[in-house]
Image (spheres, rainbow, N blue to C red):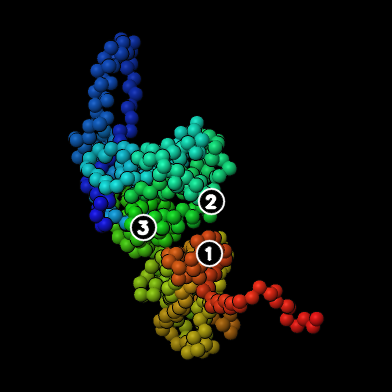
Amino acid sequence: MPINYKAIIANNVGKYYRLGIKEQDEGSLLKSVISFIRSPLRNYRTYKSLYNFKDIKSEADLERRNVLRALHDVSFEVDSGEVVGFIGHNGAGKSTLLKILCRITDPTFGRVEIRGRISSLLEVGTGFHPELTGRENVYLNGTILGMRKNEIDDRFDEIVEFSGIEKFIETPVKRYSSGMRVRLAFSVAAHLEPEILIVDEVLAVGDIEFQRKCLNKMKEFGGRGRTVLFVSHNMQAITRLCSRVIVLEHGQIVDDGPAEKVVAAYLTSQSGSMAVRQWDRAGEAPGNEVAGLVSISIKNNSGHITEAHDIREPMTVEMQFIVKEPGHVFMPNFHFIDAQGIEAFSTLDIDPKWRNKPRPAGRYSSIVKIPGNLMAEGLYSIRSTLITVNPIKVICNIQNSVSFTVVDSLEGNSARGDFGGRMGGVLRPKLEWETRYEDTLDWPQAEGNGN
């Protein structure tokens, strides 16, 4: 194959399902007998109608014919080497689309072209025979992918080591827990060298550390010029792994573009804006007769409001407020809370221009710059508070005023370096280290030892 090519082309793909047949009440014994005699013909017509959707032209036709439209007019292309994420609510059509791409089901309309061997992980245990051992299932899956036995032999130890279930590899898969099946299934899918790897939300079954290993493996897989399609509700995993994201809603593509931009827009559409909170009317704004909030916003290093932030890049948080009653000393402050409810840190406005100085009436913007390589990856919310001092009085205290996600791209230049394992803590500053070397094996004596 050429170095750069279209690995996947989907053109006007649609998928319809008939929801079922409504039971009919015949009303009398005679009608029931006649219905029984006619049932073969009726069942034949019903069977034909199950796959006939050409007369469906509108939403009313869908309801009248009891048809579910899982996908409608889906078109996109994926280049070789792209890592593409698919997001959307449950029932948006993500899993149906992946099943079509994996040739598990056919599209009702449209056409899909695939160039390359596909390995997929769509459902827990998919492709495993429950009566066979883990070892036998590894070879079964490799054979299905068209691999020779010696090719599977070369990768077998690596597959088992990555899965972490060495002790159970000779045990029938039916005795595996769901987590063990996911471990082995992902390891098989990722190590048998397909050109295209497709992974659905099933990784959520595994433990945190194994999920991290899987994400690192998929990132490595994509870095070798292979194509990865990844479905997840975990926006942190999506932005960390994918360069491009496609959003599905009611079976249609509603957004397609760079991962951070698309995820930010998706999160905004689901909850208003997570990265900006604005009060357009004075009567609705938090505050009192002394002052009131106008907005809280989070911006990236380029000055754009966004929810997803690179762990290495600085970000700013801004509070806009209006002072109605002059003569008070104000102190805006922010409290950064992680997903477990732990306060990572807080910061107060100590700008010397206004420190301990009464403010005249007017509109103010207090901006704090958060340096890169300070916060650990994860989801954070901000409690925004505006107070007066001397004496201290709370003007407003807004829990979960805005929120954002810190993402580590795992490119080696954050505080984790080349380490791919778990790092604890809510802060992750990139500190300066120095290692000194001496060409000796003598054990040093403790400093200050008088002996």
Q: Can you give x and y, in whole percent of width and height, for residue 290 in the image?
A: 49, 79
Q: Nearer the viewer, residue 87 or 31?
A: 87
- The answer to whether any part of residue 47 appears in the image is yes
Q: Residue at x 36, y 53 (%)?
A: 228
For the C terminus, which image quadrant? bottom right
Residue at image location 55% in from the left, 45% down from the top = 165
Residue 413 badge:
none
For label 3, count other residues whose C-alpha is less than 10 Å away and answer few (under 14), some (14-19) or many (20+): few
Residue ID for mark 1: 338
- Report the residue marked by disc 2: 207
Q: CA distance from mark 1 to mark 2?
A: 20 Å
Figure check: 63 above or below 74: above
Residues 159 and 412: in front is 159
- N-terminal of the pair, mark 3 or mark 1, is 3
Under mark 2, the amino acid is Asp
Q: In the rendered image, which residue does mark 3 sit on? A: 224
Residue 114 at what x, y percent from top left? Answer: 27, 46
Image location (x, y in percent) of residue 16: 28, 38
Give above or below for 296 relative to 239: below
In the rendered structure, which disc, 1 or 2, sits on the residue that comes first in sequence? Answer: 2
Tags 2 and 3 in contact by the CB under 8 Å rule? no
